[in-house]
Image: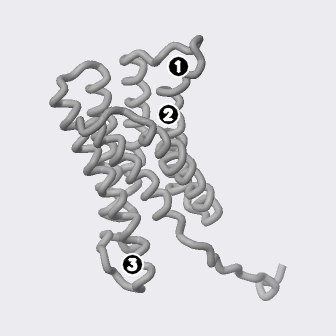
């Protein structure tokens, strides 16, 4: 085929990453305010997990797939279903009496698997940006701290873990909003520490 006959199609679709980052970040902050002891586990957290943390991230991941971004597709769809599965772990035993609640050691195994996944994704951020390194690095730490919480720890340790989770969520919110503002301004308003390719 003659190269002169090929037509290059420019991708003019919006950047879905801020949606995914904000869905993850805002839901993470709200859950970890609970872990830090500010309020009980409630319907607000579960609704955010279903809608913004779960569904919005999955939508963002599908949009990233269309853009050919394997890292973001894997991250957003995975963490979107993490939130949906977390809500399921909490709600299903209450809806269906025959389903037993998850025991602490099983919950710890669940969190450990997510910690391992996140640690590997964290390695991938070393080719992306400092901001994403902070998000994925602090999330890796958070998952393993939550493993310790589930296996038995003091209330003060759980509260400290919550504050670490709040930091992680705020880092994701910053990264998402920075991408929005930088794109709108056509210049760096909030730095992300993007690595040159």
- Mark with earlier residue (3, 1): 1
**Residue at the location (36% across, 64% down)?**
175
Judging from the image, what secondary structure is the residue with disc 3 in?
helix
In the image, taking residue 98 as reference, residue 46 lies left or right, namely left
Per the image, the residue denoted by label 1 is 93
Upstream in sequence: badge 2 or badge 3? 2
Res. 157 image quadrant = top left
In the displayed structure, 164 sits above or below 184; it is above
Report how far apart the C-alphas of labels 2 and 1 lie in the structure: 11 Å
Please tell me the numbered disc located at residue 182: 3
Q: Position of residue 41 (x, y in %)?
A: 37, 33
Answer above or below: position of 14 versus 88.
below
The picture places residue 112, in percent across and down from the top left corner, at 38, 30
Residue 138 located left or right of residue 74: left
Neighbour class for label 2 at 10 Å: few (<14), some, many (≥20)?
Answer: some
Residue 68 vs 145, above or below: the answer is below
The residue where tag 2 is placed is 87
- Crowding around mark 3 (Cα neighbors within 10 Å: few <14, some 14 to 19, many 20+) is some
Residue under the image location 41 percent in, 48 percent down: 27
Which residue corresponds to the image point at 43% horizontal and 73% vertical from the top-left?
Answer: 180
Q: Which mark is residue 37?
A: none
Circle 3 or circle 1, nearest the eye: 1
Determine the residue located farthest toward the bottom in the rendered image. Answer: 4
């Amino acid at each position: 085929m003659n190269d002169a006959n090929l037509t290059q199609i420019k991708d003019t679709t919006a950047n879905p990453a801020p949606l995914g980052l904000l869905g993850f970040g805002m839901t993470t902050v709200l859950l970890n305010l609970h872990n830090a002891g500010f309020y009980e586990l409630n319907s607000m957290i579960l609704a955010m997990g279903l809608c913004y943390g779960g569904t919005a991230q999955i939508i963002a991941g599908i949009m990233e797939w269309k853009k050919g971004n394997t890292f973001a597709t894997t991250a957003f769809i995975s963490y979107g279903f993490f939130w949906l599965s977390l809500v399921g772990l909490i709600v299903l035993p209450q809806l269906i009496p025959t389903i037993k609640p998850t025991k602490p050691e099983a919950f710890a195994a669940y969190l450990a698997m997510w910690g391992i996944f996140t640690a590997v994704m964290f390695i991938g951020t070393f080719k992306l940006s400092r901001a994403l390194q902070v998000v994925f690095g602090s999330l890796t730490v958070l998952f393993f701290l939550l493993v310790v919480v589930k296996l038995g720890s003091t209330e003060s340790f759980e509260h400290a873990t919550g504050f670490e989770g709040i930091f992680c969520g705020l880092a994701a919110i910053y990264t998402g909003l920075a991408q929005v503002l930088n794109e709108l301004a056509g210049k760096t308003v909030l730095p992300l520490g993007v690595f040159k390719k």
